[in-house]
Image (spheres, rainbow, N blue to C red):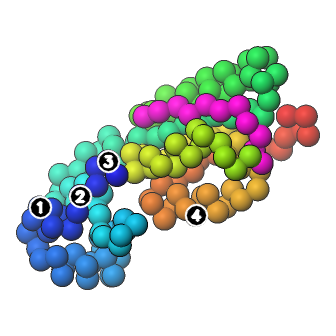
Amino acid sequence: MKDMIDISKASQMLGVDTKTLRRWDNEGKLKAYRTLGGHRRYKLLDIEKLLGIENQNTERNVFIYCRVSTKKQQQSGNLERQKQRLINYCNKRQYNVVYIFEEVASSLNDRRRQLIKMFRRLNEVYTIIVEYPDRLARFGYNYLKEFAKSLNVSIEAVEQNKKLEPNE
């Protein structure tokens, strides 16, 4: 949990009691994330925002996720073209690309290593950039979107409204 601090460190930085932080969490003023043991952790960025020392550039941090279904698609350059389109998209919007996750796997595969790695690192970014929603998941996209949203991360599909042909 990179860039996360415990409740005592957060209370020390903010100059408030840990009871106040718990109340703020319940009121929604400062979101706490829970460990498996139930301990509260806070994003350092959220603490810095409350202190007025936020770094504006970190809100432009994004992950890019590219996926094709088959090795044949990868060999024909589809994965590389998809990656380049997304890099160009991010450059135009002045996003800071933290990492590019590339994968060759079916969207129905629920054990995609790069997707899992990306979701384990969501605390590093504010947005995930994908070309189409189905690059992330053919089914269950809304679940992934809601999960990311619960961590204050949005998913931005570049070509969301474009209809694909079955062979695409």
Residue at the spot of label 4: 146
Q: Secondary structure at mark 4?
A: helix
Q: CA distance from mark 2 to mark 3?
A: 9 Å
CB under 8 Å between discs 2 and 4? no
Q: Is residue 104 at all visible to an observer of this figure?
A: yes
Which amino acid lies under the numbered mark 2 shown in the image of this protein? Ile
Q: CA distance from mark 1 to mark 3?
A: 17 Å
Q: CA distance from mark 4 to mark 1?
A: 30 Å
Residue 67: within the magenta?
no
Is 89 on the left-hand or right-hand side of 8? right
* Residue closer to the observer: 37 or 31: 37
**Residue 113 at x, y percent in the picture:** 60, 40
Magenta segment: 98-108
Residue drawn at (32%, 48%), measured in percent from left and top? 2
Q: Secondary structure at mark 3?
A: loop
Residue drawn at (9%, 65%), measured in percent from left and top? 12
- The mark closer to the camera, 1 or 2, is 2
Q: CA distance from mark 3 to mark 4?
A: 22 Å
Q: CA distance from mark 1 to mark 2?
A: 10 Å
Residue at the spot of label 1: 13
Which amino acid lies under the numbered mark 1 shown in the image of this protein? Met
Q: Is residue 49 at all visible to an observer of this figure?
A: no
